[in-house]
Image (cartoon, rainbow, N blue to C red):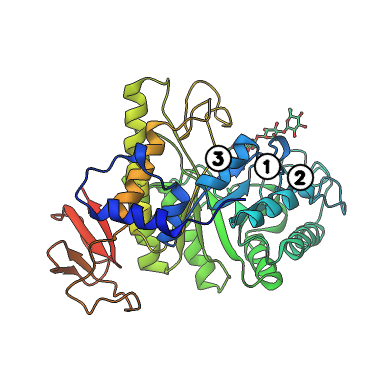
């Protein structure tokens, strides 16, 4: 059972934050989830429930998960093929095991995923594209509705949010732009047999069963603001919002490499907040580092830190999920070492950079002296510089151009490079 963060530990951690000592993440008694909880955020990890002994709280992987993370998602066990392997036969065992583990350790559960073209059971389609059973639109709508309503009923109140539809955009988004509002859908069985409105139905059915669950559209390759698939994803979600579809946000999978221009993720999140007022979360983060040389691991640590700093400054980015606990449990083939714990479950430089970014981002000794500060004070949305001068009325208005250094937004310090 994870002990709640003891007051003395929290006080000593805050004192160390406010004291002028040099912070060393390797001596920090706090864990990633402790900072996340203090900042109202979730940092989580995907769990291979079928092959990991999370029923045993003394298992080293289980312990690492509930000590460091406050959110979990099943890597494969809550996908369509796992939950309904045969028509009408639902298999909730592994999903229930994850829900029980999360409840024991006060963690949020993400559901992944109600509708996808991959890992579709064979009785629906051989490959997620072919209509082998010659289903009509009505047949497939009925199949999808039964799956979604059954799963949402079973997990109502236990799974806080769902990737309702995964990877519905085509990889080729040539010709799309914000001005023309276009997007190209993947020609999956769902699109070919039902049509685009399978999206509207899926979100609507999910919302009707569990109105409290947050509903996301999830995809890869749409992570950086300005990319063609990122533009297409925005255009699609805008169309859905304009049509009144109950969608709460987008999930950026973020299957990336250390050398990617990861600053584009935070810019994307700010764009979604500013234009649509919806969440933009990170759902499957890993950063391929290549071989475990110190240079590669340092570069990877720097990229993880940048992503977390951006995540902490965006109020519409409540959740950041890693796609794997350690480099022994990654779907990535080859010696890419993409995660924050090594093959021996030991913390890597990337882990310490996340801890330090959390530490630096958590403001304890700098309040907004220029406003009547109190814990209950309604924080405004303005951005101030470290001397207390207002530099922007909101985070959206805050322009990175010409601004670099430490700034404060909603009582939290952030670093603009
Ligand atoms: O369950 C079967 C098992 O019975 C069989 O013996 C074994 C060997 O063939 O395969 C097992 O199924 C594997 C499954 O994972 C469960 O372990 C599949 O072959 C394998 O392809 C599947 O890979 C998963 C992949 O999604 C499938 O597309 C990865 O673990 C999982 O990390 C990955 O996750 C996806 C997200 O869901 C969506 N975003 C992309 C991400 C990476 O592809």
| Label disc, if present, on residue 115 of the rendered structure | none
Q: Nearer the viewer, residue 20 or 155?
A: 20
CB at disc 1 and ligand 1 closer than 8 Å: yes
Q: Earlier in the sequence, mark 2 or mark 3?
A: 3
* Residue at image location 33% in from the left, 50% down from the top: 359
Q: Answer whether labels 2 and 3 touch (C-beta < 8 Å).
A: no
The picture places residue 92, in percent across and down from the top left corner, at 79, 51
Chain-order first, disc 3 or disc 1: 3
The mark found on residue 82 in the picture is 2
Task: Give the labeled residue for mark 3.
Answer: 64
Q: Position of residue 154 (x, y in %)?
A: 77, 62
Q: Which residue is labeled 1 in the image?
A: 76
Lateral position of residue 294 relative to residue 400, left or right: right
Q: Is disc 1 in contact with disc 2, using a CB cutoff of under 8 Å? A: yes
Q: x and y percent of residue 38 in the render?
A: 41, 60
- Residue at 21%, 77% in the rendered image: 371
User: Which image quadrant is residue 392 in?
Assistant: bottom left
Mark 2 vs mark 3, CA separation in Å? 25 Å
Q: Secondary structure at mark 3?
A: helix
């Amino acid at each position: 059972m994870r002990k709640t963060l003891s007051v003395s530990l929290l006080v000593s951690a805050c004192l160390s934050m406010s004291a002028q000592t040099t912070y060393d993440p390797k001596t920090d008694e706090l864990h990633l989830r402790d900072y996340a909880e203090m900042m109202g955020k979730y940092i989580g990890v995907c769990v291979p429930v079928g092959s990991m002994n999370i029923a045993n709280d003394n298992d080293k992987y289980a312990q690492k998960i509930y000590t460091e993370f406050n959110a979990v998602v099943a890597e494969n066990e809550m996908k369509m093929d796992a939950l309904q392997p045969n028509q009408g036969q639902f298999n909730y065992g592994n999903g229930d095991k994850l829900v029980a583990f999360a409840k024991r350790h006060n963690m949020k559960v993400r559901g992944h995923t109600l509708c996808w073209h991959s890992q579709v059971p064979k009785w629906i389609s051989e490959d997620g594209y072919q209509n082998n059973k010659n289903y009509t639109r009505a047949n497939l709508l009925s199949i999808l509705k039964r799956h979604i309503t059954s799963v949402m009923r079973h997990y109502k109140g236990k799974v806080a949010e769902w990737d309702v539809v995964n990877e519905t955009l085509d990889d080729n988004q040539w010709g799309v732009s914000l001005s023309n509002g276009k997007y190209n859908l993947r020609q999956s069985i769902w699109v070919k047999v039902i049509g685009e409105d399978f999206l509207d139905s899926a979100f609507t059915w999910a919302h009707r069963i569990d109105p409290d669950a947050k509903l996301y559209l999830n995809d890869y390759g749409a992570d950086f603001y300005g990319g063609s698939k990122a533009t297409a994803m925005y255009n699609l979600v805008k169309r859905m919002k304009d049509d009144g579809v109950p969608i709460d946000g987008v999930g950026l999978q973020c299957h990336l490499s250390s050398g990617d221009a990861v600053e584009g993720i935070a810019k994307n999140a700010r764009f979604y907040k500013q234009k649509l007022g919806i969440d933009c979360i990170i759902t499957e983060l890993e950063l391929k580092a290549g071989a475990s040389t110190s240079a590669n691991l340092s570069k990877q640590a720097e990229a993880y830190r940048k992503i977390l700093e951006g995540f902490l400054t965006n109020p519409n980015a409540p959740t950041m999920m890693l796609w794997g606990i350690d480099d022994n449990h990654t779907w990535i083939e080859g010696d890419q070492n993409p995660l924050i714990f090594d093959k021996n479950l030991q913390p890597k430089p990337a882990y310490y950079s996340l801890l330090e970014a959390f530490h630096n981002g958590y403001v304890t000794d700098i309040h907004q002296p220029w406003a009547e500060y109190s814990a209950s004070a309604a924080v405004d949305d303005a951005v101030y510089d470290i001397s207390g001068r207002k530099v922007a009325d909101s985070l959206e208005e805050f322009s990175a151009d010409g601004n670099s250094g430490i700034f404060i937004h909603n009582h939290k310090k952030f670093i603009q490079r």
